[in-house]
Amino acid sequence: MDSAAWQARDLAVLWHPCTQMREHLEGTPLIAVRRGEGVWLEDYDGRRYLDAISSWWTNLFGHAEPRIAAAIAEQARQLEQVILAGCTHAPAVQLAERLLERAPAGLSKVFYADNGSAAVEVALKMSYHAHVHAGQPERSLFLALSNSYHGETLGALAVTDIPLYRRTYAPLMMQPRFVPSPDAFLREAGETWEDCARRAARGLAAALEQVGERVAALIVEPLVQCAGGMRMHHPAYLAEARRLCDAFGVHLIADEIAVGFGRTGTFLACEQAGIRPDFLCLSKGITGGFLPLAAVLTSETIYQRFLDEARERAFLHSHSYTGNPLACAAALASLAIFDADRVLERNRERAALLGEAAAPLADLPGVAEVRQCGMIVAIELARPDRGPHPPEQRRGRTAARYAVEHGVLLRPLGDVLYWMPPYCIRAEEIARLGEVTRLAILHAAEVAGA
Ligand SMILES: Cc1ncc(COP(=O)(O)O)c(C=O)c1O
C-alpha cells in the first residue's frame, strides 16, 4: 500500500492529537511513515524527511537506534509488564539508581509515571500533599511563568499559560498565579539576557511577598520555554528562583520534560544554574524516544513526610503502566549510550555546527531573531521591531509546508521555526537543514508579499 492509501484509511478512522482535522480532510496530506533510521523518516512511497523536531522532542539518538531496540527486545522476552505496587523489578531499580546518579545531589527518590503531563500532575499533587503533611494545608496555590507549557491534562494545563490550549478549559481548572517570564526575547532596549532574567525574578519576589504563605510550588521549564516558542532565558533566573523559593518555604518544580537529557548542552538544564529543585520532572527523551515513560525525582525530606502507619498519608497516585519494564530497559540503554558515545561532548561540536548553519538565517527578510541553547535552535519570524507578522500571513505554516515538500520535517510553533534534531545528525544533514530552512523562510516571505 502506498502513502495515499494509508492517508485515506487514516482519515476514515483516526482523530489526531493537537490537530484541526479539517485541514487534513481538505487536502493537507499526512506524512504516512513506514520506517525511520537515524534522522530520517521514510514514507510508504520511499520519500525521506529529515526529522528536525525529533518527533515531538522525544528522539535522542536517531530512529530505530539498534542498541535501544535490542534492549527492548531482550526485556520483552523476560518481563513485559508487572504491577509496580507491591512488586519491583531490576530495570525499574537500576534506572532509578542511574537517574539519581546524574541528578543534582540531594534528590534521592524516584516516582515513575508514564508521560510528561502525568509527571507534572505527580509533582503538583506531591508538593501540595507534602505541605499538608507539614501542617500547612493553606499552601494550595501554584506559581507558573507566563508563556509556560506543562502538558494538557487538567492539572498540567492549569499551570500552562498558552491561551490556544488553555482558554477553552479554563472554567474547569484550578487557578494558579502567573509570574513574569524571564524570556530573553522580551528584553528591553539595552538589557542583557541576564538583566532580563533578574527583572523577571523581581516580579517573582513581588508575587511571593504578596501570596508566598499560600504557595505550594513554583513550576518552571528551565532555560527554554519550548511549546511557548522556544523562548530562552539566562540561568540567573533559576538561581534567583531557587533562592526566593527557599526564603518563602515554597517548593521549586523543574519541568525538564522537554529540555532534559542533553538538549540544552548539559545533561540537565538545572545544572547550568547549579540548583537542586525539590521536584524534577523527566519524560520524552528518557527512553531515547522509544517508549512512553516519565519520572519525578524528589528529596528525602519530601519522601519522609509521607511515611506513616496511616495508608491515607501515603501518596496514593498511580498509573497502570508505571515503571513499565520495557520502557525502563529502553531508558537504561539510552543512558548507556550517553557514556559509550560521549554524547554531551560530541554534541558541543554538533551544536556549534547548528549555530553556524542558523546564523545567516538572521539576515533573511521577516526574521527577527535566531537564538540557540545547546541542541535547540529557534528562528523567530517577526518584524524587525519584534512585533508579530500579521497572523493571516501564516508565515510559520507556509515555511513548514515548503520544508516538508523539500524533505525536512519542521513543525513551527506559530511563527517560530525551530530545530531540535536527534543527536546523531551529521554535518551534511545540518547543512541541508540550513539550506531548506533558508529557502522556506524566503518562500514564506514571498507568499506574504514581502
Ligand atoms: C515542558 C513540558 N512539560 C510537559 C509536557 C507534557 O508531556 P506529554 O506530552 O508527554 O504529556 C511537555 C510536552 O511537550 C513539555 O514540553
Image (cartoon, rainbow, N blue to C red):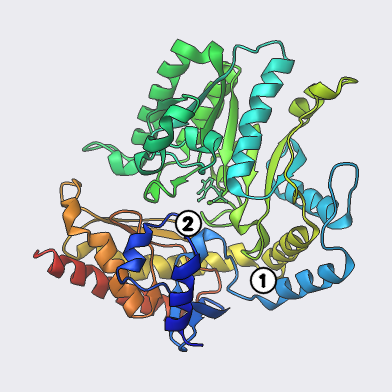
**Label placed on residue 17:** 2
Mark sitting on residue 9: none
Q: Secondary structure at mark 1?
A: loop
Residue highlighted by disc 1: 341
Q: Secondary structure at mark 2?
A: loop
Q: Residue at x 47, y 17 (%)?
A: 208
Q: Residues within 10 Å of mark 1 (few under 14, many from 20)?
A: few
| Chain-order first, disc 2 or disc 1 | 2
Is residue 394 rendered to the left or right of residue 267?
Answer: left
Q: 10 Å neighbourhood of mark 2: few (<14), some, or many (≥20)?
A: few
Tags 2 and 1 touching, CB below 8 Å = no
Asked whether, in this view, residue 198 is left or right of residue 75, the answer is: left
* Pair 2/1: label in front: 2
Closer to us: 295 or 100? 295
Residue 184 point in image, percent of width and height: 34, 42
Rendered location of residue 67, percent (x, y): 72, 75
